[in-house]
Amino acid sequence: MSTNKNNYNQFKFIEKNFFNLRNQICSEFEAIENDLSNNTKSNLKPGKFKKTTWKRKPDKGFSSGGGGVMSIMYGRVFEKVGVNISTVMGSFTEEMKDKIPGAKYNPNFYATGISLVAHMHSPLIPAAHFNTRFIRTTKNWFGGGADLTPTYLNKSKIVSKLFHADLKKTCDKYNTLFYPKYKKWCDEYFYLPHRKEKRGLGGIFFDYLEDDFEQDYEFVKDIGQTFLKSYSKIISKKINNTWTKTQKMDQLYKRGRYVEFNLLYDRGTAFGLKTEGNVDAIFMSLPPNVSWK
């Protein structure tokens, strides 16, 4: 009984801290909206997040299926940004349970996490993705990652160097093997095999982190802070630069690759749909405007 209580308290502690991180990210992004000085979108007011709650239908044997909060902002810097958070519980289907660690003989699960995707007005500022999660079956583990998708990969060496240096510094605090391992995992994961090309300039991606709960939690929390500081710094360097119609069109073509990856290969999209999550929250990652040649 005490073990179950400890597990519950542990889960609620993580959930609370994920909510705190979500709030911090939303506040920082709204501050960026307010700080824009050279407003190339003069007809737009500073964006503010609109929050919408949703609930998941309970699975058999569960009194609640959990739910989450979608936080979406359409602004003058962020063309569309979503910072969603969810806490869901239930029982995996026969199809899913063999694919999830610890669920083969007991399909019950609890999961909480943040999913962030930012699509910018400026084609000179990369799109961003950040995710952090904690999943409990008969096993417990953390997962997550952060990566950037610029319009022009070959012209983003400075951004790439800054972003990767920040991630490496944080990873090295915990284990010097983390960065090369998680960078490689990210490069291999965010890849479009049908295009034979990377989605963006990479970052880190990790999953099934279960070695030491306290250290793993601190690492995940630290990565969240690192992403927020690094991405905000990148935005500030480019926020007042003007762009051309051609550059904007190039950005819309690049977004097509983003859509292709999320619909064809993204594990988070598949997990959300197969556990009957909120469809609008799952497809929050898709850009508001996109084009294909």
Image (cartoon, rainbow, N blue to C red):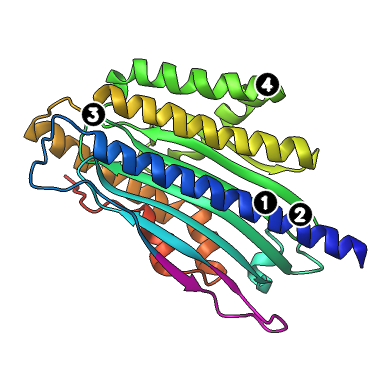
Looking at the image, residue 52 sits to the left or right of residue 76; the answer is right
Q: Which mark is residue 239?
A: 3
Which badge, 4 or 1, comes first in the chain's sequence?
1
Q: Horizontal and vertical percent for residue 126?
A: 31, 32
Q: Horizontal and vertical percent for residue 265?
A: 46, 51
Determine crowd level at label 1: few under 14, some 14-19, many 20+ residues with C-alpha closer than 10 A.
Answer: some
Q: CA distance from mark 1 to mark 2?
A: 6 Å
Q: CA distance from mark 2 to mark 4?
A: 24 Å
Give the vertical position of 72 relative to 56 (above or below): above
Q: CA distance from mark 3 to mark 2?
A: 40 Å
Residue 102 lies within the magenta run = no
The answer to which of 258 and 86 lies nearer the viewer is 86
Q: CA distance from mark 3 to mark 4?
A: 31 Å
Local SS, label 3: loop
Local SS, label 2: helix
The outermost residue toward the right is 1
Q: Which mark is residue 10?
A: 2
Locate the C terminus and report the quarter of the image it occupies.
top left
Q: Are marks 1 and 2 in contact (CB under 8 Å)?
A: yes
Q: Which residue is mark 1?
A: 14
Give the vertical position of 58 relative to 289 (above or below): below
Q: Which residue is mark 4?
A: 173
Q: Which residues are magenta?
A: 52-67
Magenta-colored segment: predominant secondary structure = loop
Mark closer to the observer (4, 1): 1
